[in-house]
Image (spheres, rainbow, N blue to C red):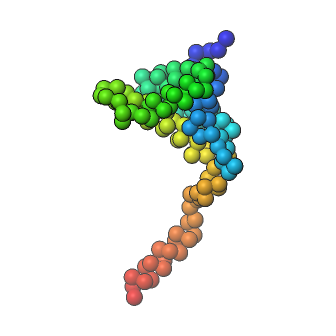
Amino acid sequence: METAPSPKNLTPTQARGLDRLGDILIPGDEDLPSFSQANLTGDMSRMLPYMNEADRSSLLLLMTACAFLPTFAIRALVALAAGWRRAPEPVAGVLRMANIGIKGVVHSLYWSDLHHGGIHPAIGYNATINEAAYEASLKTANQQEEK
């Protein structure tokens, strides 16, 4: 029997649901892994403690549901949330927030590449700071200003 979720961790069922939902949004290709292949569910512990309790509870409920729903139903749920513009208010507002929440969690975990799973190199992203080059550029800029 699974333990109750803490504000810091997903249960194994919720982690499976997140992987299934993530794979709908990020199925991967020849260059990038799918969401589940990137092995990111453990990183939810970095987000959960900072979430509003109502948002966290809703997200955990969604993750649990996604663990059991058939794939077509998860796809339909994602499509419904993404189609918020076609819904009347106040339904559109609920769907808009669901869309932001679903995509925000999945994409934040994936594109942060916390485990250095090859995502950043595959897209050519290098956020290193070269202090020596920065200092040299400042020196050059100062010399040019003095002229």
At x 48% / y 77%, what residue is drawn? 139
Where 121 sits versus 46, above or below? below
Residue 130 rendering spot, x and y as whole percentages: 58, 65
Q: Residue furthest left?
A: 89
Quadrant assignment for the N terminus: top right
Q: Nearer the viewer, residue 108 or 3?
A: 108
Residue 28 located left or right of residue 100: right
Residue 33 rendering spot, x and y as whole percentages: 67, 44
The answer to whether residue 91 is visible is yes
Please tell me in which quadrant of the rendered image residue 109 appears: top right
Residue 5 rendering spot, x and y as whole percentages: 57, 19
Please tell me in which quadrant of the rendered image residue 70 appears: top right
At x 44% / y 31%, what residue is drawn? 81
The answer to whether residue 11 is visible is no
Q: Residue furthest top?
A: 1
Q: Nearer the viewer, residue 33 or 51?
A: 33
Where 74 sits versus 134, above or below? above
Q: Residue furthest bottom?
A: 147
At x 37% / y 27%, what residue is drawn? 94
At x 40% / y 29%, what residue is drawn? 95
Residue 118 rendering spot, x and y as whole percentages: 67, 50
Quadrant assignment for the C terminus: bottom left
Q: Nearer the viewer, residue 143 or 67?
A: 67
| Numbered-mark total | 0
Q: Nearer the viewer, residue 46 or 60?
A: 60
